Amino acid sequence: ETIEMIGIEHDCTNWYRQKDYYKNKDDGLYIYAYIAGGAIVLPKRQQGNSILFKGIEFNDFRQLSDFVQWVTANSSYKIISDSVHFEEPPLKTLHYPIEIGNQWTYRENNNPWRMDRKVIDRKDVELDIGTFDCYEIKYIYDMDHNGEWDDDIWITDFISKKGLIQRTITIIGIQVINTYGDYLGYMDAIDTYILTDLNVD
């Protein structure tokens, strides 16, 4: 038995819908499954520039952002729209009690990479819909499996008693490639999700 959370996202051009299935346990909040609202795949290369990060090519930053948030070891770098993806075992998304300095493993190595979460701070986050007392939780990655945390990618969540309020994905040193495979340069990118509406009974 889980709690179904429905998220609706708009990126100025498209709407995306996702369902996540959570369960509270004594030691934390676990995610058991999710249904992605849009296909997160690595399709054939499109015309024009593309980007390269950690040796994987993407059509654009949106695709890369989805990839680092949702890809899993069993998905072969694909999450098919409207398919239920089960996390085996369930992932501890929050560790109880939530205290500054706490760190726990979110994904084990080779699933598809090591990923921890750490409580960094507690602060007020001001949005158009109100001010929220939040814990700042940072996701840290070891995507190259060298036993050290990568310094070119992280996610920062601000979580209140109402749930996830804001998420920022930061990726540094993305290579830009043209249609012919020539390197054009590097870029840093930030993707920010902000809560615009909340309906909690």
Image (tube, helix red, strand yellow):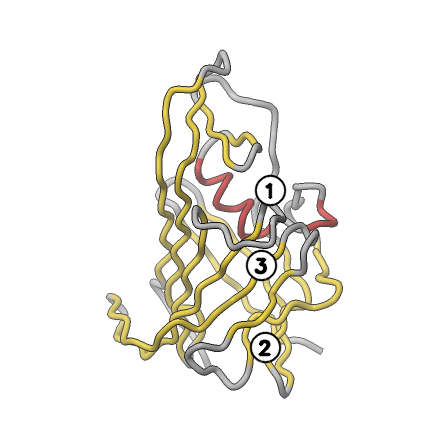
Frontmost residue, 129 versus 70: 70
Query: Residue 125: horizontal and vertical position, in percent?
Result: 28, 71
Q: Residues within 10 Å of mark 1 (few under 14, many from 20)?
A: some
Callout 3 crowding tier (Cα within 10 Å): few <14, some 14–19, many ≥20: many
Q: Residues within 10 Å of mark 2 (few under 14, many from 20)?
A: some
Element at label 3: strand
- What SS does tag 2 mark? strand
Quarter of image, res 174:
top left
Q: Nearer the viewer, mark 2 or mark 1?
A: 2
Amino acid at dot 2 = Leu
Which quadrant of the rendered structure holds the N terminus?
Answer: bottom right
Residue labelled with disc 2: 29
The mark nearer the N terminus, 2 or 1, is 2
The label shown at residue 39 is: 1
At a point 66% along the width and 41% down the height, the residue shown is 77
Label of residue 133 in the image? none
Name the residue type under label 1: Ala
**Residue tagged 3:** 115
**Rendered location of residue 4, percent (x, y):** 60, 70
For the residues labelled 3 and 2, the Cα–Cα distance comes to: 16 Å
